[in-house]
Image (cartoon, coloured by chain):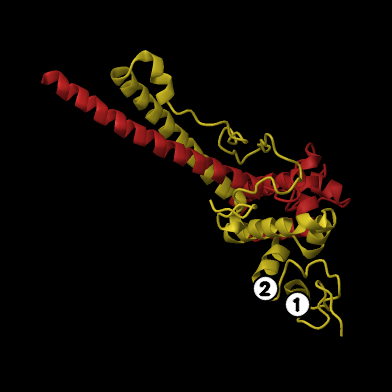
Chain colours: A red, B yellow
Amino acid sequence: MNPKRCAACRYLRRRCPKDCVFSPYFPPNNPEKFACVHRIYGAGNVSKMLQQLPVQTRAEVVESLCFEATCRIEDPVYGCVGIISLLQTQIQKTENLLARTQAEIAVAQTKHSQNQHSEFM
Amino acid sequence: MASSSSSNTYNSPCAACKFLRRKCMPGCIFAPYFPPEEPHKFANVHKIFGASNVTKLLNELLPHQREDAVNSLAYEAEARVRDPVYGCVGAISYLQRQVHRLQKELDAANADLVHYGLSTSTPGNVVDLVFQPQPLPLQPLNPVYRLSGASPVMTQQPRGTGGSYGTFLPWNNGHDQQGGNM
């Protein structure tokens, strides 16, 4: 048993075994991290997800779950999908702006070459 | 036999109750959002979030918010099933990089425009030629989302207001909430 329980086992009020699937990713000094993930996904689902993946990917999995869970707590209706929507809107607006700017550049280039041509005449 | 709009006493059970192998009772919280024709929708949501967590989430929301909440949960669940490591966060990272790339292109284009403006127009109207991005409601997650240890940076995020992302919801196919097209 781990001398100090991980945040997950502490939250779940159970012993923290040596091979606890949560302990590498939920240190005892950050209890909010597990609380947040547990609230949205549940300990059982997180455990299943981690066990189905190679060990070297699990840290990233936990971080992404934590991010999504935090987004969902902040915005219970849209979660992180709200961020995706806003980014897509931003991309579309920037693309439109870029197209306008490039069109203006084309006009300016044409004027510039016309001016140069008239200087030689 | 009378049936209410959300009951399934006569019709087939909703996808959730079918999946859970239980009777779909009148007033089933899942029935309006998980039609029997879309079994994969509930299957994904159940796999990632679990039925009881979804019930809890929906019970904390007003009825008019629940459809969007279910659709966003289904979207996240599907993303997580497709990419078990990064889920939706993979999409966010990708979009952030696109925003960054486009901003750089726009900055370069504006610099070109200033160059042509200086050589073709009088100083007074150079400023008019340069397109500045309009202020956007959300700053990009800055820097690009870090997957180790970063807490999400969300500025000006409305808290559970619903309907604030009306312009572009992934399940609307580019139609905004007011019914217009993108």
- Is residue B129 shown to the viewer in this render? yes
Q: Residues within 10 Å of mark 1 (few under 14, many from 20)?
A: some
Q: Is residue A116 above or below residue A39?
A: above
Specify whether A116 is left or right of B140. Answer: left
Residue A102: quarter of image:
top left
Label annotation for residue B39: 2
Q: Could you tell me which residue is drawn at 43 percent across and 20 percent down?
A: B127
Q: Residue at (63%, 39%) from the top-left corner?
A: B148
Which residue has dot 1 on it?
B18
**Residue B43: image x %, image y %?**
69, 69
Q: Which chain is indicated by disc 1?
A: B
**Secondary structure category for the residue under label 1:** helix
Residue A43: x and y, percent?
A: 78, 55
**Residue B45 drawn at (x, y percent):** 70, 63
Taking depth in this image into account, of A62 and A54 the one nearest to the observer is A62
Q: Is residue A89 left or right of residue B34?
A: left
- As drawn, which residue projects farthest toward the bottom? B1
Query: Mark 2 near mark 1, Cβ–Cβ under 8 Å?
Result: yes
Please give the count of numbered marks on the rendered protein.
2
**In this orientation, which residue lies closer to the viewer: A64 or B56?**
B56
Chain where mark 2 sits: B
**What percent of the width, then of the height, locates residue A40?**
77, 53
> Which residue sits at x=59%, y=50%?
B168
